[in-house]
Amino acid sequence: MLTTQPNAQRPESLKHHGQQQLDIPTYNGQCYEEVVKLRKKYLTPNVTSYYKKPLLIHKGSGAQLFDQEKSYLDMFGGIVTVSVGHCHPKVNAALEEQLRTLWHTTNIYMHPKLHEYAEKLVSKLPGDLKNVYFVNSGSEANDLAMVIARLYTGNHDIISFRNAYHGASPYTMGLTAHSTWRYPLPGVNSGILHAMNPDPYTGIWGGNQCRDSPVQTTRNCDCQDGECKASDKYYEQLEQIFKYSVPRGKVAAMFAESIQGVGGTVQYTKGYIKRAAELVRTNGGLFISDEVQSGFGRTGEHYWGFEGHDIVPDIVTMAKGIGNGFPMGAVITSRKIAEVLSQALHFNTFGGNPLACAVGIAVLDVIDEEEMQKNSLDVGTYLLKGLEQLREKHDVIGDVRGKLSIPRKINVHRKFICITVRVETCEYKRRCEELTTANRGSKLG
């Protein structure tokens, strides 16, 4: 519970309807020490764990996770993946029913769940975004979006942001702009350019008037209501890419997370994304919104993160919360753009399988029935305002970030919130620094 009184009314259901605390369930698996040995022996050594003594999680329920001894409040959601709570009864029931009916048939045959889910999912999207291709992950979704954009435009160059994360496959690794997530492989950056990240907190420009959030940075700026000078400066930097780094008027696409996830819940300066989308289209490209982490009501005010930028993208990619942890993803675009995939055969064995579609339908139903989007708005805003007051008291907190607004109701849902902490002993940060140093050493000798 927060130790300060936030500048937002405490949601009623936080006072009266907290989630029931469950007893620690009995664990009957291999002992902790044996699991550690098996992990070291059989998993590739790049599979690292958080904490000096990693948790051995064996059960989840709602917002709780359990190891052999303790229960934990899960505020991470499996990297923003468990969107309606662990083992939600309705999602479990939908999966169990489908398991007894039909596990698998490929999409070269028809099965009812694929078509039911496609209709339900695209009904959540605006404009001409009415054609969907199902895949198994966010990396696959972004891979396919890259292919579609290059085929449709006939152009090759694609722009993403520094600090962006769009996947770790050989194709999407070029889009991802974190040195710790990139291998020194030839061709990874083929046709990929990284624009300056319009970050009001750590970027060159920006400050306490520059992002659309109930909590602003503590940096001062001379922007006024209705204008953002920092956004103008970042936009000028984007224009430089079109002027100097791509063929005139020939770009395939620009990718943007609506809010950067892996990079630390970074919101862009006000108005930037809308202007960037217009610039990309003027130069023959498509604008692609990566909603893998910001979609499905997490931002509170909107169902999709891109709606907060007042745009309708040409292509939308999604995964993670789409299946509440079940492996699935999707690419959604217009019929006109999707037709380019007919130039050759394109097939995904498991994309749109009956199990995944049954889960996807149930997740959409739960989000609506339990008002999860409103919950993100209410609880997220309450938490943000409380964290803001903690930032004022503790120098270790550098920034509090999240895209939410006016309080309303509550339940259990993953909020899109980040607290940036100035801690030099963080194990994960230490590992990243080791990787960076090692990379520098190999290059510079």
Image (tube, helix red, strand yellow):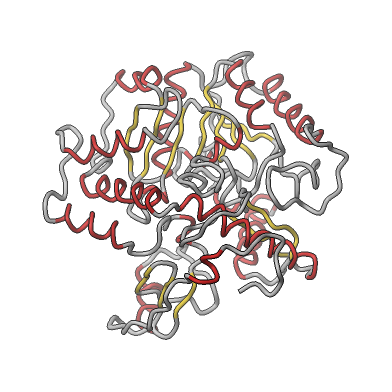
Above or below residue 177? Residue 108 is above
Query: Where is residue 339 shown, x and y percent of the image?
Result: 34, 19
Q: Nearer the viewer, residue 432 or 7?
A: 7
Q: Nearer the viewer, residue 408 or 364?
A: 408
Q: Quadrant of residue 401?
A: bottom right
Q: What residue do we see at 43% from left, 18% from top?
A: 152
Outermost residue to the left: 101
Query: Where is residue 402 shown, x and y percent of the image?
Result: 63, 52
Q: What residue do we see at 86% from left, 43% from top?
A: 221
Q: Quadrant of the N terminus?
A: bottom right
Q: Quadrant of the C terminus?
A: bottom right
Query: Where is residue 177 shown, x and y percent of the image?
Result: 60, 43
Q: Quadrant of residue 236?
A: top right
Q: What residue do we see at 34% from left, 85% from top?
A: 31
Above or below residue 277? Residue 168 is below
Residue 46 falls left or right of residue 233:
left
Q: Nearer the viewer, residue 261 or 147?
A: 261
